[in-house]
Amino acid sequence: MNRWVVGARPRTLPSAVAPVLVGTAVAASQGPLVAWRAAAALVVALSLQIGVNYANDWQDGARGADRERIGPTRLVASGMATASAVRLAALGSLGVAGATGLALAVAVNPWLVLVGAACIGAAWLYTGGPRPYGYAGLGELFVFVFFGIVAVTGSAYIHHSRLSALAVAASVPVGLLAVALLVVNNLRDRPLDEAAGKRTLAVRLGDSATRRIYATLVALAQAWPLALVPARPWAALALVTTPLAVSPIRRVLAGQSGLALIGVLGDTGRLQLGFAVALAAGLWVT
């Protein structure tokens, strides 16, 4: 596989696609869509996710925090790419997100520039800057906000310039599954992160509590569509993905660790994408 594809961390990309699908479906249920804006929202989301992945690779590599790894290979730490090249890739990806977001802001509302700047800042400071918030146990909160609430409501807003209660409500399970993806990733890396001085939420809470949090996040996300049923009955269609949640929850609660959790990470990403497709379909047809 191409090294830059590896560095982009394909297993994390459902976190970018899912909110755009759901937000676009909310907008479609409220009026006509503007096709190029939906495509632009997807470009922004994917570019941000890839940008934060490259930035994390470069920043961790520069700190020497990825010398020992359980998960997929990192470009800088493995020597597959130089730190400067990965830094340039991160800046390029975030630049694409910024330029595309600027086009949306010009077409929809100039205030979106501030939202875009906040998203890019959050992506860069996750593991960058003097006090990376990802190392302080705050990564999950920021993921919920930016890959849940902001991404879904933003993807809906760009079509009708309206922030609706439905968009906010639909963003919650999307954010919960994005957080679950990060939680299982940090659970896998917990022993090495602790040794490297990374105080992720998994390191702070410990193994058992992190496993329970993962199971709770996934279960709550699966149940959430029931809260949308009074307004959008077909939102219950998302429940068809519940069987996909059983195996990863069971494996995490059974104590799987290390390399075994890479499979759980993949299962969580597939669940996240499948859930988003089903929920989007239910919201769209209502």
Image (tube, rainbow, N blue to C red):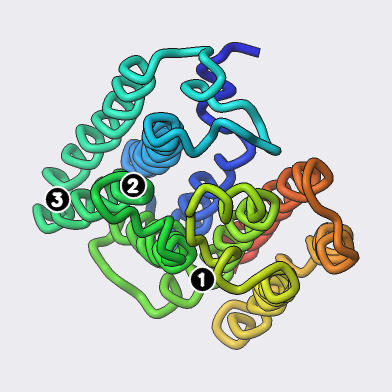
Q: Earlier in the sequence, mark 3 or mark 2?
A: 3
Could you tell me residue 6's position as x and y percent?
A: 59, 23
Q: Earlier in the sequence, mark 1 or mark 2?
A: 2
Residue at 56% over, 14% down: 3
> If the image is split into quadrants, where does the N terminus sit?
top right
In terms of secondary structure, where does tag 3 sit?
helix
CA–CA distance between discs 3 and 2?
Answer: 15 Å
Q: Is 129 left, or right, of 238 in this rendering? A: left
Check disc 1: other Cα within 10 Å, few if <14, some if 14-19, many if 20+: many
Question: Does residue 255 show up?
Answer: yes
**Label of residue 262 in the image:** none
Discs 3/2, front: 2
Residue on which the image places disc 1: 170
Discs 1/2, front: 2
Looking at numbered disc 3 in the image, what kind of residue is underneath it? Val
Could you tell me residue 259's position as x and y percent?
A: 79, 41
CA–CA distance between discs 1 and 2?
Answer: 23 Å
Looking at numbered disc 2 in the image, what kind of residue is underneath it? Ala
Instruction: Indicate whether 222 appears above or below 104.
Output: below
**In contact (CB < 8 Å): disc 3 and disc 2:** no
Could you tell me residue 115's position as x and y percent?
A: 21, 56
CA–CA distance between discs 3 and 1?
Answer: 23 Å
Looking at numbered disc 1 in the image, what kind of residue is underneath it? Ala
Residue on which the image places disc 2: 123
Check disc 2: other Cα within 10 Å, few if <14, some if 14-19, many if 20+: many
Q: Quadrant of residue 134?
A: bottom left
Q: Earlier in the sequence, mark 3 or mark 1?
A: 3
Q: Residue furthest front?
A: 195
> If the image is split into quadrants, where does the C terminus sit?
bottom right
**Label of residue 113 in the image:** 3
Instruction: Indicate whether 130 appears above or below 84.
Output: below
Q: Quadrant of residue 102?
A: top left
